[in-house]
Image (cartoon, grey):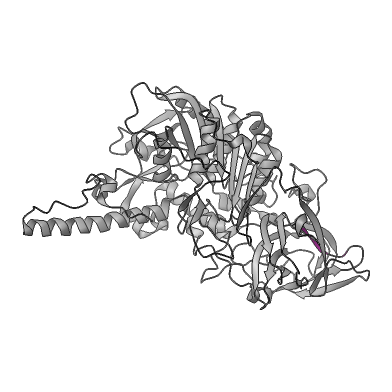
């Protein structure tokens, strides 16, 4: 990470990071000490703000200089990597005022008009520092990194960052996240942007996580200014892809997310750490609000919906929170139910995700399958953000791909009309772990991928189905987890929000956890096997209570017996029924997760179901084995059933016509 000297904050010009040597010795010593002190404080401030407010999160690797394809698009900046800053309120249709920061390229020529990159943020656009620190830095960046703003400014784009209704310095309150009201506000803000004297009438949206989701939701407005959209780690299905994967509530994540958003909405920054409280005063007031009077008025209106409490009042995706007046469902606020409008916008979309980004790799491909205007996809060996680079085969945190350059290439092509060579390249770009190679495809899964079924036998997997039907009894252990460290961190789930990321993303040997589950090992592979796509576990199962949760892990076993994590899936058996009428297209069987389709099994009653695993691209090496491990809990990341419905044992049917098996998406060149 580049260190920040005083010159980075405009105190001294570049090249003069210390006073000249002609100072008297005593004065020189005093100045040097002062500069050293301020440099240390300055660097500390920079690192703290990066840690707590960077959307890439702590532990996020720095970007490399590689780009995808053969073009290696890397244009020279048009402006210095700096900006002219202003901030103001913009009234919405109902009179509620939203705060927007505008960053223009430094010394933009008079009368020059430029396109605008727009971010609609939930986690505060920028912060004002306390008085002592304000001389060093006027604002501290929040949801969007300063580096990213300067990057787009330097390449001839204005940047607008908007505090959504009920957040930051904006007025109003929130009835739900990603609400229809929020989308309406986006359209009004785009109206305002294109009327500004510096705007050329063209806009593009981008962002990470929540901001990535609002980037895509903005397309619902069908605003004529929108020319490109680049959602990163966005949430396409709010229920299934983040808060209830497999119908199981992801309570620890939602709890930490609520803690973060409540702290930001009310400016009660203590939960974010004493050091943040030391440096940060509050969200940046708009220009002219020197005493923060309007800011305080706005924050007093932030009586926002408590999503944590709300999730305890619902279980199904279409179930309204009847304990709250608005009675919105998760589906009311999800992209997937409004996808026709996203597609009708015609705005080109570039979807970016990571293989270890919670369950959000599903969102990338659901978006691809269901929107004809998705023009480009990139999925790498990253967690949420993309933040940290991780595979079983490398220890580096650095990302070799320069993601900002990839985004710039897409924007220049679709917003500025520059031929960047994108039309000559495949739609899908994905990284295959194990081979450590980037690959391309026009479709997902790639056309050379074929299903290979491996049938469960007692403690083993076989490509041959056996005629004899049997069942395996497993006594449940609820202490299993995917995490490590004191709090069970370091997983794909922990990367979803900063306060939840207790450790760097890392999956070590799984053997201790495998001992708590039912394990099925395949034969030793005589050649490499590339698994690319969506593995699916076809399961015939019963439990001693007729209820319960199931967690399935796909792993690689080395010759010395060490097991490595590849991917996972989960299911609440109350949602075990498959649907013939899914809400959207996928390449695997689906559950509806709707109230009317919930089932009530009797104790020890068998049911056939499918657990779809989070997609991956992974090559298992020759000499190693495939392992499937089946458990009943991930105690550090998902709810555990209450004692009255928690099963003591499960039974898995094997063999015969209805025996359990795993369907693997295998590259055909790897099939014997």
Helix, strand or loop for the magenta stretch, by majority: strand
Q: Where, quadrant-wise, is the N terminus in this rendering?
A: bottom left
Q: Which residues are magenta?
A: 659-664
**What residue appears at the point 76 percent right and 63 percent down from the top-left corner?**
547
Choose top left, top right, bottom left or bottom right for residue 62. bottom left
35 over 185 or under it: above or below: below
The magenta stretch spans residue 440:
no
Give x and y (percent) for residue 649.
Answer: 77, 73
Q: Is residue 4 left or right of residue 242?
A: left
Q: Nearer the viewer, residue 69 or 110?
A: 69
Q: Is residue 385 left or right of residue 605?
A: left
288 over 466 or under it: above or below: above
**Furthest residue to the right?**
467
Residue 305 seen in the current view:
no
**What residue appears at the point 28 percent right and 54 percent down from the top-left corner?**
42
How many numbered marks, from 0 up? 0
Give x and y (percent) for residue 513.
Answer: 65, 73
165 over 567 or under it: above or below: above
The magenta stretch spans residue 660:
yes
Choose top left, top right, bottom left or bottom right for residue 554. bottom right
**Furthest residue to the bottom?**
560
**What residue appears at the point 8 percent right and 52 percent down from the top-left corner?**
22
Give x and y (percent) for residue 662.
Answer: 79, 62
**Furthest residue to the front?**
70
121 over 537 or under it: above or below: above
Give x and y (percent) for residue 383.
Answer: 55, 56
Q: Nearer the viewer, residue 61 or 498?
A: 61
Q: Where, quadrant-wise, is the C terminus in this rendering?
A: bottom right
**What residue appears at the point 84 percent right and 59 percent down from the top-left corner?**
608
Residue 482 seen in the current view:
yes
């Amino acid at each position: 990470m580049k260190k920040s000297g005083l010159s980075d904050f405009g105190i001294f010009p570049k090249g003069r990071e210390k006073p000249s040597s002609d100072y008297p010795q005593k004065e020189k010593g005093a100045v040097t000490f002062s500069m050293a002190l301020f440099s240390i404080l300055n660097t500390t401030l920079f690192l703290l703000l990066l840690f707590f407010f960077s959307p890439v999160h702590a532990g996020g690797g720095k970007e490399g200089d590689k780009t995808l394809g053969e073009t290696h698009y890397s244009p020279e900046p048009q402006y210095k990597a700096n900006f002219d800053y202003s901030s103001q309120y913009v009234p919405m249709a109902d009179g509620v005022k939203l705060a927007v920061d505008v960053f223009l390229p430094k010394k933009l020529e008079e009368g020059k008009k430029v396109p605008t990159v727009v971010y609609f943020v939930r986690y505060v656009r920028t912060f004002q520092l306390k008085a002592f620190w304000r001389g060093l830095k006027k604002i501290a960046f929040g949801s969007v990194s300063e580096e990213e703003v300067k990057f787009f400014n330097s390449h001839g784009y204005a940047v607008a960052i908007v505090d959504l209704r009920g957040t930051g310095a904006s007025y109003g309150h929130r009835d739900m996240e990603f609400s229809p009201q929020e989308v309406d506000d986006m359209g009004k803000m785009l109206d305002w942007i294109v009327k500004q004297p510096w705007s050329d009438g063209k806009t593009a949206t981008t962002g990470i996580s929540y901001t990535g989701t609002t980037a895509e939701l903005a397309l619902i407005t069908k605003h004529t200014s929108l020319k490109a959209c680049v959602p990163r780690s966005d949430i396409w299905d709010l229920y299934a892809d983040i808060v209830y994967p497999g119908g199981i509530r992801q309570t620890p994540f939602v709890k930490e997310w609520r803690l973060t958003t409540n702290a930001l909405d009310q400016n009660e920054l203590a939960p974010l750490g004493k050091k943040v409280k030391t440096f940060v005063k509050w969200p940046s007031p708009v220009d002219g609000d020197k005493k923060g009077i309007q800011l305080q008025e706005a924050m007093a209106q932030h009586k926002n919906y408590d999503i944590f409490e709300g999730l305890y009042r619902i279980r199904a995706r279409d179930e309204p929170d009847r304990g709250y007046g608005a009675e919105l469902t998760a589906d009311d606020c999800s992209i997937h139910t409004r996808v026709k409008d996203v597609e009708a916008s015609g705005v080109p979309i570039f979807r970016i995700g990571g293989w270890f980004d919670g369950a959000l790799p599903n969102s990338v491909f659901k978006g691809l399958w269901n929107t004809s205007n998705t023009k480009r996809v990139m999925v790498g060996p990253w967690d949420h953000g993309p933040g940290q680079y991780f595979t079983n085969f490398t220890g580096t945190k650095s990302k070799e791909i320069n993601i900002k350059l990839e985004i710039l290439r897409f924007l220049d092509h679709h917003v500025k009309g520059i031929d960047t060579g994108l039309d000559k390249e495949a739609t899908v770009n994905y990284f295959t772990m194990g081979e450590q190679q980037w690959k391309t495809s026009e479709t997902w899964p790639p056309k050379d991928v074929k299903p290979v079924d491996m049938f469960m036998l007692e403690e083993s997997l076989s490509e041959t189905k056996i005629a004899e039907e049997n069942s395996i009894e497993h006594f449940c252990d609820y202490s299993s987890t995917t995490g490590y460290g004191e709090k069970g961190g370091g997983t794909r789930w922990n990367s979803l929000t900063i306060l939840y990321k207790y450790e760097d993303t890392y999956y070590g040997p799984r053997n201790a956890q495998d001992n708590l589950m039912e394990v099925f090992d395949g034969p030793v592979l005589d050649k490499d096997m590339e698994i690319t796509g969506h593995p699916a576990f076809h399961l015939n199962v019963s439990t001693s209570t007729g209820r319960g949760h199931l967690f399935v892990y796909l792993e690689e076993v080395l010759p010395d017996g060490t097991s490595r994590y590849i991917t996972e899936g989960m299911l609440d058996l109350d949602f075990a029924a498959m649907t013939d009428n899914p809400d959207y297209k996928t390449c695997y069987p689906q559950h509806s997760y709707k109230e009317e389709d919930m089932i009530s099994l009797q104790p020890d009653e068998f049911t056939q179901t499918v657990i779809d695993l989070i997609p991956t691209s992974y090559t298992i090496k020759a000499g190693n084995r495939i392992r499937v491990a089946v458990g009943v809990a991930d105690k550090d990341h998902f709810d555990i059933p209450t004692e009255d419905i928690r099963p003591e044992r499960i039974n898995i049917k094997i063999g015969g016509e209805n025996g359990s098996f795993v369907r693997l998406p295998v590259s055909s060149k790897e099939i014997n």
